[in-house]
Amino acid sequence: MIPELGNFALIIALMVALWQAVFPLIGAVRQDRALAAGAANSALAQLVLIAFSFGCLTILYAQSDFSVVNVVQNSHSAKPFIYKLTGVWGNHEGSMLLWILILAAFGAAVAMTRAGELKAVTLSAQGAVAAAFIAFTLFTSNPFARILPAAQDGMDLNPLLQDPGLIIHPPFLYLGYVGYSVTFAYAIAGLIRGRIDADWARAVRPFALAAWVFLTIGIAIGSWWAYYELGWGGFWAWDPVENASFMPWLAGTAFLHSVRVVEKRGALKVWTVLLAILAFSLSLVGTFLVRSGILTSVHAFAVDPERGMFILAILALAIGGALTLFAIRAGKLQAEGAFQPASREGALIVNNVLLVTMTATVFIGTFYPLFVDVLTGERLTVGAPYFNAVFAPLTGLLLFVMAPGAVLAWKKGRLGAAFRQAAPAAGAAAVVIVIALWMTWPKSVAAAAVAGLAVWAGGGALIELARRISLFSSPRRAPARFAGLPRSFIGMTIAHVGMAVVIIGAMGAGVWRTEAIRLMNIGDVISVGGYEATLKSVDEVQGPNFVSETATFEISRNGNRLDTFAAERRYYPVRQMQTTEAAIRTTVLGDFYVSVGERQADAGWAVKAWYNPLVFWLWFGSGLLALGGGVAAMPAPARAKASAPAIEGAPA
Amino acid sequence: MSRLFLYLPLVIFALLALWFAVGLRHDPSRIPSVLIDQPLPEFSLPAIEGHDNPFSSADIIGEVALVNVFASWCIPCAIEHPQLIKIAAEEDIVIAGLNWKERPGDGAAWLRRLGDPYDYIGDDADGRVAIDFGVTGAPETFVVDREGRIRYKQVGPITEQIWTADIKPVVDRLRAEAMQ
């Protein structure tokens, strides 16, 4: 009964979405207010229906109803209860349901905004996207399909996904991906109505920020999960699916910067609309990548060309349609403000060019193997060396323009003054470069330089903040001035510092790490980065649905005994898969990370140990990025106007 | 002119979509397997300590056989073991074991404890033969036909389900092939 109810709700949701895609648009074109206003109600109805459907699937998982194919394939009666619930989205069908649930939630959020000229058309576009994905779920990936007779027990959830990090990673990623559907829908509405202006930018910006914040958190959690679960000591592998989440992030970051120019100066309209389309298109491409089986990846869901064709058709309609509209209508958009190259606008253009180049770099690296395969049938992969080689200089340049860019005035800025103001940051950067080289020699000089540039960028942001609140000239009034600063400026400063912190963390964990490997028996010692780990015992431990080989180590640093930690290798019999659980000791300066491999006949266990400097900075910096985005999305404080002196010079 | 530029994203996307459509017909997970349909590597291994049936490649020519890579230190092997015992009892099939990277005596002790499904066991203490087989981990099982060619490879333990769904059909087909 429950599966049928869920299915039925989904079918009605499809009807509602189709209605929403067509009639509000007609209403807007014919100036029929009543018809246009129906959009908001149908968006809310859609949310209720899909939430109901999602609730049904959750109940089926909670009850381990093995008459439903999806539950059989992805659950098991012995699985811990929390993973029964999260198993709802640990598979293709269920995660599609989550995807459309989030899509409906964003649609409802748009429905709650103030009525305006754009709203009905935006909701129409949103409804069209929703209809396509609900249809995809119903017709190719129905999570409510029954199996007769019911199965005895389930096949369990992929053990790699039975992990707290993976409970929250996909929902955040989808919140990010799907959030860009709103910017996309606004772009369509703006093009149809011929209105890309300050109002449009103000309407779309909170949604773009929300999507960006969610995507940032989603990527960071995914990276954190890969770090402690996959047992290879790294946090980013340039895996196709990681890239798929990174591309919309890069394009979305570019959009956040250029939409500011539209809002403040009425320029870069065509480009900004294109970025809005691009960010969501890349989210769709990411979905296509994961679910069509077109590339291999640790993340790939079912390999099913039929689903792939369906998503490709959605892609062709959504992206192709949007770009056609863009080609026809974008030429009519009028730029309002002119500006000099040395200005905030100019700096943001440099930022956009760099970010879009980065996006293209990731895109080419990700799809090049497919391109070669289609042309020649040859198999190859594009690995980290390509990405690192191309990314390091681009990141360096981006960091270099960040400090002066955030200081320049709109329209016509003074480049020399901007650089002079950031001079102390340059000093700090030089010191950091020297220290980094001294500590990590003979590792990469480029990494030290990039870390220095990160200090320059973060320092530049903090100096500008100090200047705006007159921290040094009148420190007593600084807190009051700070409270009066525009939220967008505070958010930008936090995010820029966060970016610097992430980059420094990435240099530490990616380049400066040191590793040791040896075969260990009980009592043997492995040492790296000043830490020593002594293998104390290896025990077989029975978990709820796995058997674990747990290796316990006693650790000491520079001769001082600290405590013990344990690394595991787990075997999940139902899925016949092994997972590793690394032993990690985290400090602000670095992680001591131990991973245990197979036992070699009589020589002992293969143990790998890493000292990963500054890993904590990655997670902390990601948190700052998300916080900055969140603050920037907040409405301006009511008393901002009263403290006018503090906010002179428009913020970015 | 500048109007035409606005069509550029659409054109680029159209090309990409075409390329994706073609790409969908390619299977990304096919890993060219070197050994499938290739003859068994030639080897002659001594029996393991405490066991008296050595294993050389010639032993299983003329029979449809399973070659199973195992070791007492491998946890999944212990999980697989009851299934092998069951196959040995119920099926008319030769099962040969490749005791991989084992200390003298450990393999036999392990078999005494868990039961012995093997007709032949070779002592591959240094792992040389396993390398010829392209073994990446234990357990792994190869299905070999009567001409001594490897016809199927199972990575990871054989479970009841894998046996009935994947391996037994191959074995039955090879038997039928030989009948004709």
Image (cartoon, coloured by chain):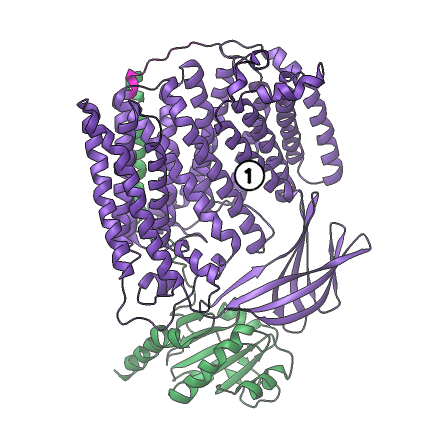
Chain colours: A purple, B green
- Quarter of the image with the N terminus of chain A in it: bottom left
Residue closer to the observer: A476 or A503: A476
Q: Residue at x 33, y 28 (%)?
A: A186
From this viewpoint, which residue is outermost toward the right? A559
**Residue A547 in view:** yes
Q: Residue at x 60, y 71 (%)?
A: A541
Residue closer to the observer: A246 or B21: A246
The residue that label 1 is drawn on is A388
Query: Mark 1 falls within which chain?
Result: A
| Residue A53 on image: x %, y % | 31, 52
Q: Is residue B63 above or below residue A165?
A: below
Q: Quadrant of residue A396?
A: top right
* Apparent side of residue B86 relative to residue A528 in the rendered image (left or right): left
Span of residues in magenta = A330-338
Q: Secondary structure of the magenta portion, mostly?
A: loop
- Looking at the rendered structure, the secondary structure element under dot 1 is helix
